[in-house]
Image: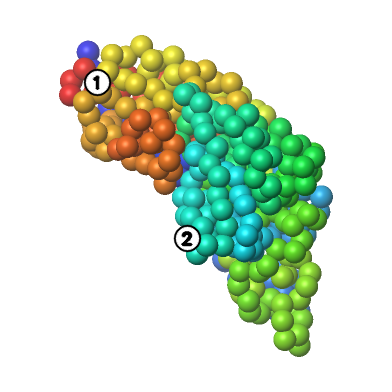
Amino acid sequence: MSIKPRDKMLYLDNGATSYPKPDVVIEKCANYIRDVGASPSRGGYETAIEAGRQVFETRNNLSKLLGAASPDKIIFTKNATEALNLAIFGMLSDGDKVVTTRMEHNAVIRPLLELERQGKIKVFWAKLKSDGRLDIEHFFELALKNDVKMVITTGMANVTGVIVPFWEIGKFCREHNILYLVDAAQLAGSYRVNIEEDFIDLFAFTGHKALYGVPGTGGLYIGERAKKLRPLIWGGTGGYSDLPDLPDIVPDKYEAGTPNTPGIAALGAGVKYILERGIDNIHLHKEKLLQTVIDGLQNIPRVKLFGPTDSTDRSSTIPFNIDGMKPKKVAQLLWNRYKIAVRAGLHCAPLIHQDLGVPDGTVRFSFGAFNTIEDAQYAVEAVREISVSA
């Protein structure tokens, strides 16, 4: 007996962009556009001052959530990709060596390969274990024997949901005087982190995923050991207009140009929502969804799961394939028959798919805070029907 298709979309692509957004996020964005409208630091009148206050409020909320030493150490960008480019091109110089992993997103892979093509840096790639987790011994070995300046890891793999032991890597890097950059596009808002206690020097995040903000927002935490970071963009900062160069203060030095203030204000509301609900509660909820799907899919003939077979140190992202079917065909059937929205392909992370032995990529379920156990069960049954009928 086939399951009844839903009337409304079941959104399972939160690894790309979280949806739906909390009502407070929508309201904050709309209120800014309707009632404020001005740019921060670009006037002494009431609404310009209010715009600046909302930007600071978001910085402050992020500082609380992430354990940053000061709100001013968090600068805003338009996404995690821009933040990673700022960190990579702004810290690395001729002759530097870098260790990273084969589970990284193209936002890390491509800037590093570009610098290597230019002959400026050398990159070493740490292996993964058969279940998609990082081979931490190989990672540390590469870092120790190659006199590296920086190590870069994702905080949470966007393909498998594996949580990299960033706390362990941060301690190692601090002990060996190596800079540590974390790509937290998937991590921020999904799992507890304390930037200072975990010894992270640079922490790049995006607003539109697990922080429940809108697209076009993100940022970079810049620690004391990375204070020589070179800016990526030069221009007006709203103040210090008499200076011929960017003001040498953070965050102004890295925020030239008019910011996405409505987006930043909405991001602050998203972070406040997480602080009030509790990040551990959100993680535990998604862990239950993850285990429900793992338990269901691994008992379906022709379905192959990738990544760990348990929910330990993992978030609610599940890659899978159906034998004999292309991932994009499975995704199309999920949408056409069941209105389940997923992503299929390489997910901007080609190296991990090579290691998993699936050059065409995978189908990816990625659950969010607003999904339910019923959603997880429905997704499993939809895959079961496709595997039998196709």
Q: In the image, 196: left or right of 79?
A: right
Res. 233 image quadrant? bottom right
Circle 2 residues within 10 Å: few <14, some 14–19, many ≥20: few
Q: Residue at x 77, y 47 (%)?
A: 177
Extreme-front residue of the structure: 145
**255 is higher (above) or lower (below) than 243:** above
Res. 186 image quadrant? top right
Q: Residue at x 79, y 69 (%)?
A: 249
Q: Which mark is residue 387?
A: 1
Q: In what element is the residue under mark 2?
A: helix
In the image shown, does 259 or 35 lie closer to the viewer? 259
**249 is higher (above) or lower (below) than 329:** below
The type of residue carrying mark 2 is Arg
Can residue 114 be seen here? The reply is: no
Q: In the image, 152: left or right of 305?
A: right
First in sequence, mark 1 or 2: give its number: 2
In the image shown, does 361 or 99 lie closer to the viewer? 99
> Looking at the picture, how far across and down is residue 379, in whole percent?
36, 25
The type of residue carrying mark 1 is Ser
Q: Which mark is residue 117?
A: 2
Disc 1 from disc 2: Cα separation: 44 Å
Q: Residue at x 81, y 50 (%)?
A: 69
Q: In what element is the residue under mark 1?
A: helix
